[in-house]
Image: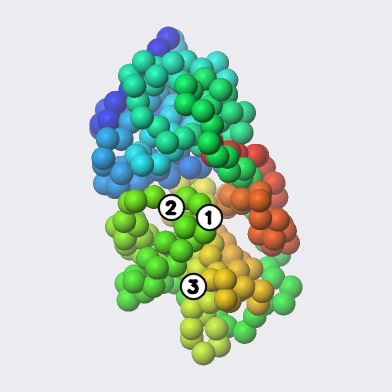
Amino acid sequence: MTWYLTPDITRFPESAETWLLHDTVRNTVVLTVLNGVRAGLWVEDPLLAWYERGGDVHGLACHTPPHNLLLPDLSLELVGSLAAELIDMNRKLPGVSGPLPAAEAFAAHWWRPERRRRAERLYRLGTLTGPTAPPVGRARTATADDLPTLVSWITDFEREAGIATPVDPTPAISRRLTRAELVWWETGDGRPAALAAASTPIAGMSRVGPVYTPPELRGHGYGSAVTDAVTRHALSRGAREVLLFTDLANPTSNRLYQRLGYEADLDYASI
């Protein structure tokens, strides 16, 4: 009964990813991050951890600096033993993100005092209803010509959301472009008005995010329209579960997604 830790994705056992697939909804973030690690993102000192008991995997975690440690839906007992392992190895962590009970339990074990907390809620699509009064315009999938604007908008989104890091987002955005994951909502005269992304389905699961409308364009329904469009895009690519996270400090976005047919599933936290 022990935690195994490695920086090498090729040593990460297939049985650990199989464990994640038993609940693609609750494990959505870790699944997509592992796909990114396999694609060559986050190569600076990554850490992959999995817990074995009786030859079977019962939990895992991953850390891709400079981001937070990511936890799936772990038992609190395993959270405590993972914290002890990482403290013993003097692992530097800026924070932890995961389902609320697991994130709080890890923070309680960690030696570093809590500085800031971001409360989030995971939503899963029920029945997509669409916006009641869609604005004039159309949706289109972003192309390579859009890269400079995409980098600018996503940088603005991360800064506004308080999740900006010193990492250049261009490589990750370029990969999302090649996978046709980014969708614009354009006004009637062809100007970008809102942006949304949906991950390529993994075992039938796709996650929407980010969703961003520049401040000067808000209040016209563009965010609702692009969320509806990117959700339909994900469904057309084979997603059976479409998910998204909201910042609980933003009641407007929470109401918007519920009107479109998203239903609350589980609370998360970044600490």
Q: Residue at x 45, y 20 (%)?
A: 82
Q: Secondary structure at mark 2?
A: loop
- Circle 1 Cα neighbour tier, 10 Å, few/some/many (<14 / 14–19 / ≥20): few
In this view of the protein, can residue 179 be seen by the observer?
A: no
Tell which circle, 1 or 3, labels the residue nearer the N-terminal end.
Answer: 1
Return the residue nearer the eye: 244 or 153.
153
The kind of residue on which mark 1 rests is: Ala
Location of mark 2 (residue): 164
Residue 47, placed above or below residue 144: above
142 left or right, relative to 226: left
Q: Measure how far apart labels 1 and 3 are at the Cα level.
A: 20 Å
Labelled pair 1, 2 in contact (Cβ < 8 Å): yes
Residue 153, placed above or below residue 46: below
Location of mark 3 (residue): 184
Label number found at residue 161: 1
**Residue 115, horizontal then vertical, whole percent:** 53, 36
Q: Secondary structure at mark 1?
A: helix
Residue 239, placed above or below residue 265: below
**Residue 95, horizontal then vertical, whole percent:** 46, 35
16 left or right, relative to 205: left
Tell which circle, 3 or 2, labels the residue nearer the N-terminal end.
Answer: 2
Q: Secondary structure at mark 3?
A: strand
**Residue 148, horizontal then vertical, whole percent:** 34, 71
The kind of residue on which mark 2 rests is: Ala
Return the residue nearer the eye: 106 or 256.
106
In the image, which is nearer the foreground, mark 3 or mark 2? 2
Labelled pair 1, 3 in contact (Cβ < 8 Å): no
251 left or right, relative to 115: right
Quadrant in which the N terminus is drawn = top left
Q: Measure how far apart labels 3 and 2 are at the Cα level.
A: 22 Å
Q: Residue at x 30, y 47 (%)?
A: 41
